[in-house]
Image: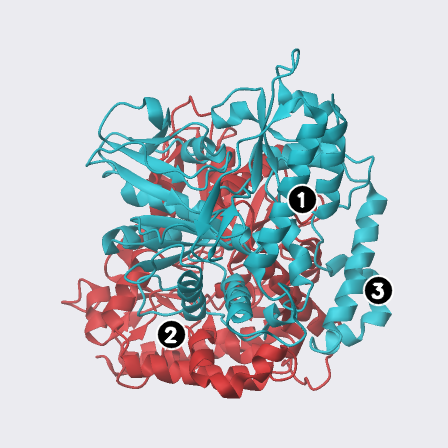
Chain colours: A red, B cyan
Amino acid sequence: MGRDHGDGLVAVAGRVGVVTSVVLNLAVLGFYLRGRFFGAGAGAAEKEAGKKVKKAAAVAPSSGKPPVSAESTINLDHGDPTMFEAFWRGPMGERATVVIPGWQTMSYFSDVSNLCWFLEPGFEHEVRRLHRLVGNAAAEGYHVLVGTGSMQLFQAALYALAPPADAAPISIVSPTPFYSSYPAVTDFLKSGLYRWAGDANTFEGDEYIELVCSPSNPDGGIREAVLKSKSGKAIHDLAYYWPQYTPITHMLAHDIMLFTVSKCTGHAGTRIGWALVKDREVAQKMNKYLELNTIGVSKDSQLRAAKILEAVADGYERQPAGASGDASLLFHYAQRQMMQRWRALRAAVTASGIFSLPDEVPGFCTFAKDTVTANPAFAWLRCDKEGVDDLEGFLREHKIITRSGTRFGADPKVVRVSMVDTDEAFGIFVDRLAAMK
Amino acid sequence: MGRDHGDGLVAVAGRVGVVTSVVLNLAVLGFYLRGRFFGAGAGAAEKEAGKKVKKAAAVAPSSGKPPVSAESTINLDHGDPTMFEAFWRGPMGERATVVIPGWQTMSYFSDVSNLCWFLEPGFEHEVRRLHRLVGNAAAEGYHVLVGTGSMQLFQAALYALAPPADAAPISIVSPTPFYSSYPAVTDFLKSGLYRWAGDANTFEGDEYIELVCSPSNPDGGIREAVLKSKSGKAIHDLAYYWPQYTPITHMLAHDIMLFTVSKCTGHAGTRIGWALVKDREVAQKMNKYLELNTIGVSKDSQLRAAKILEAVADGYERQPAGASGDASLLFHYAQRQMMQRWRALRAAVTASGIFSLPDEVPGFCTFAKDTVTANPAFAWLRCDKEGVDDLEGFLREHKIITRSGTRFGADPKVVRVSMVDTDEAFGIFVDRLAAMK
């Protein structure tokens, strides 16, 4: 996955705290923005807006988290990709607008002739088109499945690859440092089909499912399966295998490959992931999980994700009116942003003197047609200063919330820090970091 | 739940079959409709539609199932509520249109101060407003949780109510005939937290979770918990407790009450359900399930559901321009449709002479302020004709697909038939039924 959740989110929400006035201000802001953007197209209800400010504010879409200031606690525990919002407020934004009339897509079904009968054909079309454009994964000859985020598809893959219900639970492993949600999500229902077995590097046995997250959440490294048994299986979590995070060096063609719009375009709230699955029977069984778990996946979000992916590909295939530079090129825009952030972070680490980061990893990107440096979505930040044995706690004293290395099977002198939050939060983070001695 | 899925959907998709030309026709139709509705508001991409008919057809939203004809196999196995589409194509349709700009609701978060941090405030507002309007369930003092359909919330409730992971799995029971998905969904992951234990009427013991589906899927009856142990727990699945299906006789106030827009307004593809939960700790644990399972719930579908529920309530609180009669009153419209369908079904059963149905159940509806008859979303159809031991198989010979009573813990002389499919499918069904002797 590489998406974040779990203890972190709710615990932190409680810790950070939100005063009522901030919430109200956001509601008013939301209403203002809504008025600007909805004025022309949204029907009679919107035109009555003036008469019902109070009510409209109450039903305005949420703005996520409250804004931050220099005094705020900065929450970089989870990888909430709000960094990308600026791109979508630019000239590409209008092309990604989705309009859904009240009568549309009411049925459970999207295409009864498809193995994944709740998959919107338009979304599948744009997924395949995007992989052709970027060249990061083979989609030809693969089944496409849609999930409520790729985390649901991860669980679907466990269900599909596990042995029959009368066998012993299969071991689920991943090399340390592994994504912190893998153990929690594998074990929370105490399934008799599979169970978390920890670090793949130390696992002994031939029957297992290895989770390969590449680029790795948390440390950004490029990974391949470490276990090589013929009877072992692998799930490739490729949430971050996009040009803004890492050079695209290979067109991958693994048996099960998971992706998510959350990390590709920044639309985490849309909760849409997809899987490319080679084997038809595995795809059918994964689909069965999605039927039993949620009877399919939100069509509205599929329609929106299709529109967003279409806009991304259109941005590369034709220059939209009003767009110049990389304002229409999502991956180029995002790569530049990530590169600037990594430069700022490395400068802050140098200024401080008590931290270290993984080395820079350059590579030739077949998409950018250039040698570029990886800019991971998370910083795997280490502190070897004497007396700092719990880096998460140390940073929390500076009102910076991160996720301890212990959650990833690593040591407490390291933390994972989101690099994809808002400009404001990131700016305050690097300023505070540079000042720590 | 009362929603349908599972073996039924995919198996039937295969059986019914779809010829390519039908799919292509639907794509063209979809494009035509899209052009009509999207012309004004959807940005530059749509305006190029004329140049790219072929591609636009490929990305047009799906239309669900193919249309039926007098020769078709009629699939009434699952409760796909496409009957409601006609209402939303009427004057209320425009008020339910949702417009989502590309930059909106990108964050995982909706409101960090809420226990359910991914719940859109506007959706919560409309849920509470709708319960006040209809008077079917107490929402004051309850926590509102949102799920990817109420099936996900059902699983969240099992997780929340189950004893700690080191205890034996708790027994999940429901009185026969129980909703056919309860056993499958309870057991598919072979959880060590809970396990299906069958008919609540014959269950012995004090530790259990009873699933109370009222009105009942499959037979439409009003149910209360049959087990009364103080240490037992109950989940009330109220998917069908809306005025179109049954008289609203009480403002219910159970510990956990599940609802879904799918059966309330007909938007099954939106995959949005909600739970009203009395106890804060139970709500927190249910929310934890939703975090671990899917890291929250589609915001796009929450925004759309909020808009739809707002339109429903607005229809009652003010008469929209262009709407007359019950065209703006969803529950009145749908109640009339359901009543007409039940009359047609009862007439067909009388004409045939080999079938029987549950008796009509009248009651005073506090919402309609009148004595009305229940019009369940499913017909629980029995055939006592000699030689017909497998009613599902018998109807299949007449190209009518239903769900056997055996799936609900009942006998094979009875089937469940969806009453909420399209007018065309329903009309062909009753015509065929009337002709069977």
Q: Nearer the viewer, residue A35 or A227?
A: A35
The quadrant holding residue A411 is: bottom left
* Front disc: 3 or 1: 3
Cβ atoms under marks 1 and 2 closer than 8 Å: no
For badge 1, the amino acid type reads Tyr
Residue B399 visible, this angle: no
Mark 2 or mark 1, which is nearer the start of the sequence? Answer: 2
**What crowding class fits label 1: few (fewer than 14 Cα within 10 Å), some (14-19), or many (20 or more)?**
many
**What crowding class fits label 2: few (fewer than 14 Cα within 10 Å), some (14-19), or many (20 or more)?**
many
Would you say B403 lies left or right of A422 here? right
For badge 3, the amino acid type reads Val
Q: Residue at x 49, y 64 (%)?
A: A268
From the top left corner, tell me how far across and down residue B351 is, in percent.
72, 29
From the top left corner, tell me how far across and down residue B305 is, in percent.
52, 63
SS at mark 1 in the image? loop
Q: Residue furthest left?
A: A387
Question: What residue does disc 2 label?
Answer: A65
